[in-house]
Image: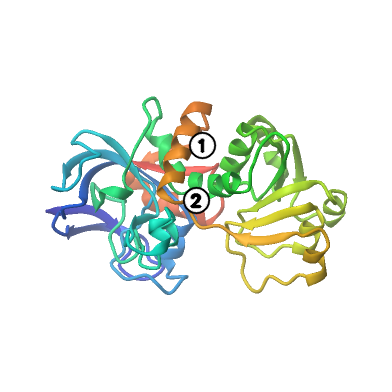
Amino acid sequence: MRVQAFAALVAKAALVPFAYDAAALGDEDVEIEVSHCGLCHSDVHLIDDAWNRSTYPLVPGHEVVGRVVAVGRAVTHLAVGARVGVGWQRSACFACDRCLAGHENLCAAQQATCIGHHGGLGERLRTDARFAFALPDGMESAEAAPLLCGGVTVFAPLRRYGADAKRTVGVIGVGGLGHLAVRFAAAFGCEVVAFTSSPDKRKELHAMGAHEVQSSTDARALRGLADRIDLLISTVPARLDWILYLQALRPNGVLCLVGASPGLLQVPAAQLLTGQKSICGSDIGDRGTMVEMLRFAARHRIVPTVETRPMQDVNLGIERLRANQARYRIVLEN
């Protein structure tokens, strides 16, 4: 099958129309007619080969929504016509200890939707059906797309570290991931403190459910938050004063990184010992967490703020991402 798509032919290049022959549909696979695909900063990193993992031509896109048009012989949970979503992960071994424990996202043999495979910025996508998730009725496709990567990435640590009405959650960086973290944390009943370097977002953040909005770079303001927060989720790929953020944590508090800040993260060991504080990372979510997140979002009407554009405007969307102009997620539509 010949697939029409958009691809970067070399690193850091603009995307151009590109056609490729799809691999044969395997027994566990599903073929999806793509209706929507969200743009994520990870797509920009892949286009630029920032992680030294890209191969070209490269078709990015890993927040994919569409209709099933074909299923492999072993697929029983999806039928032709089903509306599904696909996120960052496209496969796992299903045999290692991590997979058997339900943590497929930690599988050493996992594969990504658009690393070594062509992603969702095209007309069709073939992938392992076990990583294609039926979307709840009533959830708009354009709104579902960002949940499949950005949504599960912030939902997973909130769920893992017990977000509830007894806890205060801080969200550092309020972009595509952060604005979803604010909405999820508010729906869990948490007191929510949003940290942003953009003062003009204050009104929007309160409307999303933030109870308090603080500067992410104002040292004096950060010192005033000492011993206030149970869980800090950092979505930013930037250097920050992590010592001040650790001081903002209560005893047993957790600083969880879902954005990869550059360089080394250096903090005094005593600051972790005193108060039993922790620093950790979180990587997307397993399949069970993805299903739970989609149901939770549908039930609580967790809706990302999106800009929808035609798929042909992919380069304009990418440039808006590079310039940090997206408010808050860009979704391309076939």
The residue pinned by badge 1 equals 304
Residue 284 visible? The answer is: yes
Q: For the C terminus, which image quadrant?
A: top left
Taking the spot 30% from the left edge, 69% from the top edge, the residue there is: 56
Classify residue 102 as left or right of residue 257.
left
Instruction: Give the percent coordinates (x, y) of residue 9.
Output: 30, 67
Amino acid type indicated by mark 1: Pro
Q: Classify 163 as above or below 280.
A: above
Horizontally, residue 328 falls left or right of residue 168, namely left
| Residue drawn at the location 60% of the way across and 45% of the way down | 158
Q: Is residue 321 left or right of residue 32?
A: right
Nearest the viewer among 156 and 175 is 156
Task: Give the alpha-carbon distance from disc 1 to disc 2, as whole Å.
Answer: 17 Å
Q: Which dot marks residue 64?
A: none
* Circle nearer the viewer, 1 or 2: 1
- Residue 21 pos. (x, y %): 15, 59
Of 141 and 71, the residue lying toward us: 71
Residue placed under numbered mark 2 in the picture: 320
Q: Is residue 228 left or right of residue 154?
A: right
Q: SS class of the residue under badge 1?
A: loop
The colour scheme of the drawn protein is rainbow
Q: Earlier in the sequence, mark 1 or mark 2?
A: 1
Pick the residue in front: 258 or 41: 258
Q: Position of residue 6 (x, y in %)?
A: 29, 55
Instruction: Give the image quarter of residue 96.
Output: bottom left
Q: Position of residue 183 (x, y in %)?
A: 60, 36
Specify the farthest residue to the top.
Answer: 138
Task: Please tell me how crowded label 1 is: few (under 14), some (14-19), or many (20+) other residues with Cα within 10 Å.
Answer: many
Asked if residue 268 can be seen in this view, the reply is: no
Amino acid identity at mark 2: Arg
Q: Secondary structure at mark 2?
A: helix
Q: Residues within 10 Å of mark 2 (few under 14, many from 20)?
A: some
